[in-house]
Amino acid sequence: MYAVKEIRQTLLKEKYIEVVNIVDMLSAAVEANPERHWSEHEQNIKDSIEYFDTLPQIFAAAYKVIDGELIIFTKRVYETSPLEPLERPEFIEAVFSNEQGSIVIGDTPENQQYRDVYLYYRWMPIYSAPNERYLIVTGVSYYSVSSAVPLWVSVGQWVSMGITFAINTGLIILLVRLGYIYESRQGDKWRKRGRHYE
């Protein structure tokens, strides 16, 4: 069970790294031409993030600051990931304190199980003034991982556990049998020596 848990954690880490790389790639594309006005990137960012948000159990949203408040400007697919990070004070504090970073938020969507959502956020373009930037936020949880742990891993673990159980059971039976032999000899462990040993 521990091995399966570790494999799942590794798959989750890989999924998180994947979404981080996608956001960083989008940022690199936005910042490739510093001469371009920051508002001209909005449609590309909107299309990219809205597509990203349609993927199963992936949270993706883009925000911009209007009158000092973060306003979402992408359409959300709440069926796959109903999280709304703007409702979390720790998220607001984190994004207004750093250019980019990560935060873990616990979430229990309606009719779904609890999950830790690993959010990655980044402001772009970096060369623009703070009120002329877009905030991109993506998030994954264990439910975002589409690759399951291979069946042979679990089967192999159960087989090895069965073999270990059989060996331990055999050793216990052997010890009980040796104890019986020891008792039947009235405490003498060894057979008496024959004349050829004298």
Image (cartoon, rainbow, N blue to C red):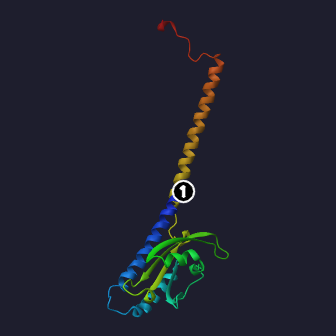
36 left or right, relative to 163: left
Residue 161 visible within the image:
yes
Q: Residue at x 50, y 60 (%)?
A: 7
On screen, residue 189 above or below 78: above
Residue 30 figure quarter? bottom left
Q: Nearer the viewer, residue 83 or 71?
A: 71
Residue 143 lies, in percent from the top left, at: 56, 71
Judging depth in this view, the residue of 26 and 130 nearest the camera is 130
Q: Dividing the picture into quarters, in which one does residue 105 lie?
A: bottom right
Q: Residue at x 47, y 83 (%)?
A: 135
Residue 128: image x %, image y %?
39, 87
Q: Nearer the viewer, residue 99 or 150?
A: 99
Location of residue 183 by image quarter: top right
Q: Quadrant of the N terminus?
A: bottom right
Task: Identify the residue position indicated by label 1 in the image.
Answer: 154
In this rendering, is residue 139 above or below 33? above
Q: Position of residue 193 (x, y in %)?
A: 52, 10
Q: How many marks?
A: 1
Compared with residue 42, is residue 3 higher up or lower down, i.e. above or below?
above
Q: At x 48% / y 72%, what residue is drawn?
A: 102
* Residue under the image location 42 percent in, 78 percent down: 22
> Which sits in the foreground, 71 or 80?
71
- Is 61 on the left-hand or right-hand side of 188? left
Can residue 54 be seen by looking at this rendering? no
Instruction: Name the amino acid type tagged 1.
Output: Ser
Give the secondary structure at mark 1. Answer: helix
Residue 153 in the image, given as x and y percentages of width and height? 51, 57
**Mark 1 neighbour density, 10 Å: few (under 14) some (14–19) many (20 or more):** some
